[in-house]
Image (cartoon, rainbow, N blue to C red):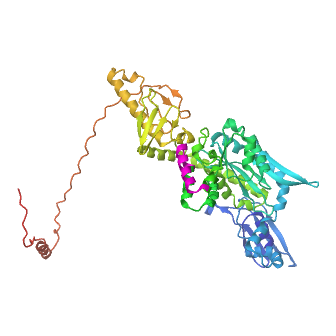
Amino acid sequence: MDAVREFTILKGREIKFKRNESYRVRAICKWTIGEDEDMVRCPWVAYASRDSEETCWQLKIFKNEHICPRMSKNRAANRRWLAGKLVKKLRRYPSLKHSEAKAYFRRSDAAAQYGLVRDYAETLLKSNPGSTVKIGTYLQGDDPIFEKMYVCLDGCKKGFKVGCHPLIGLDRAFLKTRFGGQILSAMAQDANNHIYPIAWAIVDVENKENWRWFLDLLLDDLGDYMANKWAFMSDMQKGLASAVKELMPNVHHRFCVWHLWKNFNKQGKEQEYRGLLWECVRETTRHGFDQKIDRLKRLNEGAWAYLDKWPREAWTRAYFRYDKKIDNICNNACEVFNSRIKEYRAKPIITLLEEVRMFEMWSIAKNKVKLSHHVGKLPPIQHSRLQKIRKESQKWTPNWSGDEEYQRFEIHSWPTNMAVDLGKCICTCRFWQITGNTKRSCAHRKADDFASVLVAKEKGYKAGESTDPANAATTNTQVAEINENAPLAPGQAVDDANASEIVPPSDPPPPPQQVTRPDKLQSKRKITFNVNPMQRASSGTTARLAEFMTFVPTPGFKPPTTK
């Protein structure tokens, strides 16, 4: 029985003993699928019995064929089996802790897996043509010692180039094995803001040299950062900022504000200072940023000095570049990735790399299924944000500035106003320039959509009054329609990919219909029921009810006079 138990735990299958007697034992696999007549069982079976002299057990039937999947949990690994594995360890170390025993089981094959790294790399390249796998070693005597390994699958880098935001998050996390090390990762976000793994690497230590090696290979896979307008975000790791500056001198490099906020808390514990930091970060106009940062300087000059030593384009939206079209201020994609692989970081290197690859494949496939039945031009997250902005636009009143193209408006709301140019995709709040004009826009631009419709309708009515009604539809004016993605100015159509491209209308619009007052709703008819409530009551009950309902006037009561 112990031999069968050890074998099934090693293979990752659950078994049960169908016959367990003093002279014979039969074990079968517990896996089944289906019910009743359609039930299918795994064919694995083992039968053993004592020999004629009853000195040993003899295996007589053994069908080593499994059609069931490998199980990650196995009840055969019970307390008795675990105690048998730790008995020698406990005799040597009687005060062995639970965490130390757990680490003892995990590191049993950790050293052996480093000898299989090259085989694993060849397997990845064979199953994923076009991928990049690099292994770095150093010599200790005549033996090569593992130092670092880089993995970037072909499907990941192609998917990032086609359908992800141009912001790459960089981060690292510690490995929890006895050999130590860290895992470096490059993460992105797809159109629905789901995390999208691009590349990862195992290094012995985090320093400038290893970050430079990782970024150099990443740029070889993704292409020129200037041509593709890539931007990077990090947590101000050791040596990363200098490596980015050397490899990509003109790249837009942002800092995660969450880590900046943690270090900022050391300057003062007042809640007002912490709130001012987030106000400075979220401010989109430079005038508003200057007012908030000056207020922070008056309250705590040390906190102001800490923020002032970092480049402002790295942590506040007021100084973000326009060409990236993304307003992220936190490196959440990398944080989510590190938390998801937290359990895997305590496993040997081959198991770790395989678990990371499986997580990457599973997350992309799950997000694909989630969006497979979605209907609409925009992903669900971007559509919900657009609806929120459209609700906020109801607080603003658009006023046309008088230009011939009907593209410049002034949007009023207490206590301020904004200027919007639909042709150049510009708003003085700068939120439109930062986030882009295809997926997100500011509330002021949404108010302009309604304003352009009103101006187009007014011009259409005037054209209809001055020309013949039969030819009114052939004039060069056209009533604009509200579109979720881009505004349509009068007499032109704006494409979703480029809001400034003018497309002439194919068919003239119908003449405007006269709006009449709707008919009044019919009043509800009162339904009366001619039913006697005392129909089946006795004569005594009827008499008591009549006496009870008799009106008894109060002394001094005067009935109202009728006119």
In front: 223, or 526? 223
Residue appearing at x 6%, y 58% in the figure: 562
For the C terminus, the image quarter is bottom left
Extreme-right residue of the structure: 142
Instruction: Give the quarter of the figure containing the N terminus.
Output: bottom right
Image position of 46 with respect to 197: above or below: below
The answer to which image quadrant residue 550 occupies is: bottom left
Work out whether residue 221 or residue 7 is closer to the camera in this orientation and state it: 221
Q: Which residues are magenta?
A: 281-301
Q: Is residue 414 visible?
A: yes
Using the image as rendered, state which of residue 498 and residue 91 is in the foreground.
Answer: 498
Q: Is residue 505 magenta?
A: no
Residue 93 image point, x, y percent: 81, 77
Please give left or right for residue 323 compared with residue 464 in the image: right
Estimate the x, y position of residue 416 in percent, counting from the top left.
44, 43
In the displayed structure, does residue 33 sit left or right of residue 350? left
Question: Residue 284 at what x, y percent from top left?
Answer: 54, 45
Q: Nearer the viewer, residue 364 or 538?
A: 364
Number of marks in picture: 0
- Whether residue 152 is visible, yes or no, is no
Q: Position of residue 6 (x, y in %)?
A: 79, 69
- Quarter-wise, where is residue 250 in the image? top right
Magenta segment's dominant SS is helix
Residue visible at 59% across and 39% down? 322
Left or right, residue 91 beside residue 32: right
Q: Residue at x 53, y 30 (%)?
A: 500
Q: Is residue 300 magenta?
A: yes
